[in-house]
Image: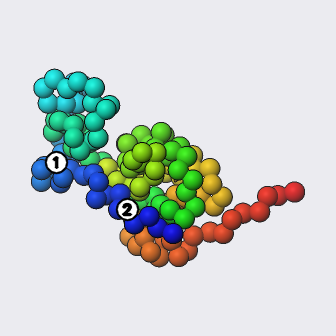
Amino acid sequence: MSKGLEGNANRGVRELGAEEKVGWDQVSQGVVLNSFVGETENPAFLKPEERAYNDFNSYTATVASWRIIKPVYNRDICIDCQNCWVWCPDTSIISRDKQMLGIDYDHCKGCGVCVEVCPTNPKSLLMFSEAEGAETALANWPEKKKKEK
Ligand code: SF4
Ligand code: SF4
């Protein structure tokens, strides 16, 4: 049963007022990038959309164009273990109050790490073609695998 929460509704560069996303190819090699504008105290206690990110922070920038396959999330199987949130290298798993909400497709690069670390049977995250719709992907979800004797 879906909890009716859209992951991307909670996060994204558009929400921050940045119309143009910054690509990593616009950043010179070796440059030091400050994550925030000005002094920021304890950003870990703020939600991402409440932090004052600068234009070159990986929150404001995006590597989403690298993606040719994407993770699709199946709420019905997820046990909210947070493994995917811990391991995602692009902080693209959206979780609030230890509840998995979905994928931030503005930032996900399609590496598949989240799928690898998902412990459920079948997995609650699976990689599909970038062009695949979520509804079709969910309709084609594999059945639970039986243990081999
Ligand atoms: S595919 Fe990679 S970047 Fe995208 S959500 Fe999963 S771990 Fe994060
Ligand atoms: S790793 Fe799998 S089961 Fe755990 S929170 Fe992520 S999607 Fe849910």
Say if 131 sits above or below 60 in the image: below
Amino acid of disc 2: Leu
**Residue at the image position 20 percent from the left and 26 percent from the top:** 40
Classed neighbour count for the residue bearing mark 2: other residues with Cα under 10 Å, few (<14), some (14–19), many (≥20):
few
Residue type at mark 1 is Leu
Q: Residue at x 21, y 41 (%)?
A: 50
For residue 73, say whether it is visible. Answer: yes
Asked if the residue at tag 2 contacts the one at tag 1, i.e. Cβ–Cβ closer than 8 Å, the answer is no
- Residue in the foreground of this view, choosing between 107 and 97: 97
Q: Which residue is mark 2?
A: 5
> Horizontal placement of 73 versus 53: left or right?
right
Tell me which corner region of the image, top left, top right, bottom left or bottom right, holds residue 149. Answer: bottom right
**Whole-percent x and y of residue 63?**
30, 48
For residue 34, above or below residue 12: above
First in residue order: circle 1 vs circle 2:
2
Residue 73 % position (x, y): 47, 61
Whole-number angstrom distance, CA of label 1 to CA of label 2: 20 Å
- The residue labelled by disc 1 is 16
